[in-house]
Each structure stands twice: as structure tokens, then as C-alpha cells.
Image (cartoon, rainbow, N blue to C red):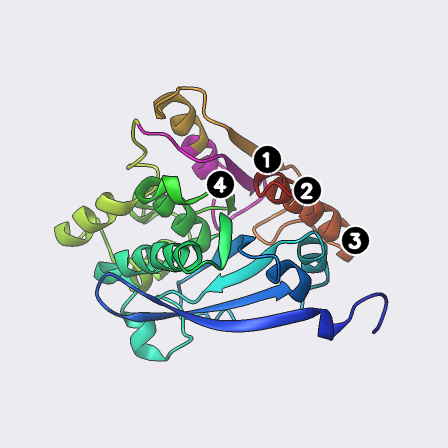
Amino acid sequence: MLGGFSVEDHEEHRLWATAPDGEQVPISLVVRRDARARGPVPTLLYGYGSYEASMDPSFSIPRLSLLDRGAAFAIAHVRGGGELGRRWYDDGKILRKQNTFSDFVACAHHLLDQGWSSSLVAEGASAGGLLMGAVANQAPDLFAGVVAGVPFVDNLTTMLDASLPLTVTEYDEWGNPEADPEVYDYIAAYAPYDNVGEQAYPPILAETSLNDTRVLYVEPAKWVAKLRSTAADRRPDVLLRTEMAAGHGGVSGRYQAWKDRAFTLAWILDRLGLA
């Protein structure tokens, strides 16, 4: 035991969810043993699924405050990431991007249906924020809340603007909707902003930074405004939090970053009924 933390108090699991096309999608989960012993556990489900980035399980000090309050933390290793090699990446990009979203939804269903989780909050940032916007549109009833950090939610508009500094270099990931009608139609079918509908949405926390040059703050601002004006009840629980002195990576400084994360975790714990 060090500083009140004991490895023996926690247990890790590798689970497998079945995607709609039959693909087996890995899930990494960590939870306190005493919480798991009481049955299904409120769970934070994290996802990214882009740029061949592997979301490897790792130790996190701030995450302990989540686990110590009785929640579980899970990572959905969806396609578009690099966890299972190049094929895993290729199956979640450009004209196969929907696999990323379907994989995440399959992971959520698995956790709930197999008795691992009693409720779920979904979280992702940047391209993972795009994932959050897509699943909020496609499976809103699965989640008690959705956290979208610096979310790339107006991706069709951005990818149509070649004058932006990052757009052309992003064609390998998303395709070029300006030059390819098939890519345009495909992105238009899943783009979070363009597919906000008159339906009930879970509570959403959108977090952005005024000085973000990768995903401009106007993207989540537009998204939140459309959610508030379009959702079925016209008064959805959607919060936009804008950091006024930070960029795409959030605030600088370890302690300020922990303070920033504490705000997000407090919102998550409230949605999971553990506040």
C-alpha cells in the first residue's frame, strides 16, 4: 500500500463485445473488488477509435477518485484505433467509420446486458468527441450521460474547408468530401452536428477551449446550440464548458489539470448516482 492505494483492492478484466458485423471488440475494465462484489457497477466507458491510436490501459491518479466512490472504468477498444493492428485501423476510417460507432454501442450493450454495469456514462475527446456525438445521436437511450471533450462534432463543415491548416492532412483519416461525393454522403450520414434530431438526448457535458487550433471552439458551441433547439423536449440537459486560457490539450500545469479533471469527474459521478 502506498498513499492509501492498494493494488489488491482492485481487479481488472478483459471482456469481448460482439459488433453488428460479428467482429469481437475488446473492452478493458477496472473496478474495486468490494464494488464489484455488490453486483453491477455504475461505469464510465471511454472511447477514441481514430488515427490508429491504441488506448492502452494505464494507471491514473485522478481515476482513483472515481473507483473509490464505487464506479468502474472501462475502455472500448473500437475499430479506428491500433490495438489489433493495421486492419483494426483500416476498418474504422473513411468509408468504414461507422464501425467505430457501432463497436462502441456494442460495448455499451455488452456491459449492461452481461451484468457488469448498472448504468453508463460515455466519454471521449477530440476524435473521441466525434464518437460521443455520433453515439448520442445513434443510441441516446444507452447512456446516463455523455462527456465530449474538445469534440470534433462539426466534421463535415471542417473537412469541406481546405483553407483550414489541418484539413488537407486529415483526408487520409476522413476522406475528402469536397472531391468525392461518396465520402460527402458518408460523412453527412454520421456527422454529429448534421444528425442532431428531434429525439430525447442524455445529459451532455461538452468541454472546449477558446484557444484550441485543432478543433475550433465553434464546433461544440454550434453543436450545443443545435441540441438545445432541436432535441425533443427543447430543454435538454446540455452544458457547454469553455476554458478561456487553454488549447486542445486543456489547461497547463499538473495541479490545474487535476482541478479541471475534478470538475468533469464530479459531473460524471452525479450522472452515475455516486455524487
Which residue is the extreme one toward the front? 38
Q: Given this view, does label 4 or label 1 mark the residue nearer the observer? A: 4
Instruction: Check disc 4 and give the amino acid type.
Output: Ala
Cα gap from disc 3 to disc 1, whole angstroms: 19 Å
Give the labeled residue for mark 1: 241
Above/below status of 188 relative to 115: above
Q: Quadrant of residue 18?
A: bottom left
Q: Residue at x 50, y 63 (%)?
A: 75
Residue segment shown in magenta: 199-223
Query: Within the magenta stretch, is there residue 77?
Result: no
Q: Nearer the viewer, residue 55 or 172?
A: 55
Query: Where is residue 274 drawn, in percent x and y?
Result: 65, 43
Q: Is residue 140 left or right of residue 213?
A: left
Dot 2 or dot 3: first in sequence order is: 3
Query: Where is residue 275 drawn, in percent x and y?
Result: 68, 40
Q: Is residue 219 left or right of residue 183?
A: right
Q: Which mark is residue 263?
A: 2
Question: Counting other residues with Cα less than 10 Å from the Cα at mark 4, is it few (<14), some (14-19), or many (20 or more)?
Answer: many
Cα gap from disc 2 to disc 3, whole angstroms: 13 Å
Which residue is the extreme one toward the right? 3
For label 1, the SS is strand
Q: Residue at x 36, y 26 (%)?
A: 231
Q: Quadrant of the N terminus?
A: bottom right
Give the labeled residue for mark 3: 255
Q: Is residue 268 left or right of residue 226?
A: right
Q: Quadrant of residue 201?
A: top left
Q: Nearer the viewer, residue 105 or 81?
A: 105
Give the labeled residue for mark 4: 144
For label 3, the SS is helix
Dot 4 or dot 3: first in sequence order is: 4
Q: Residue at x 84, y 72 (%)?
A: 2
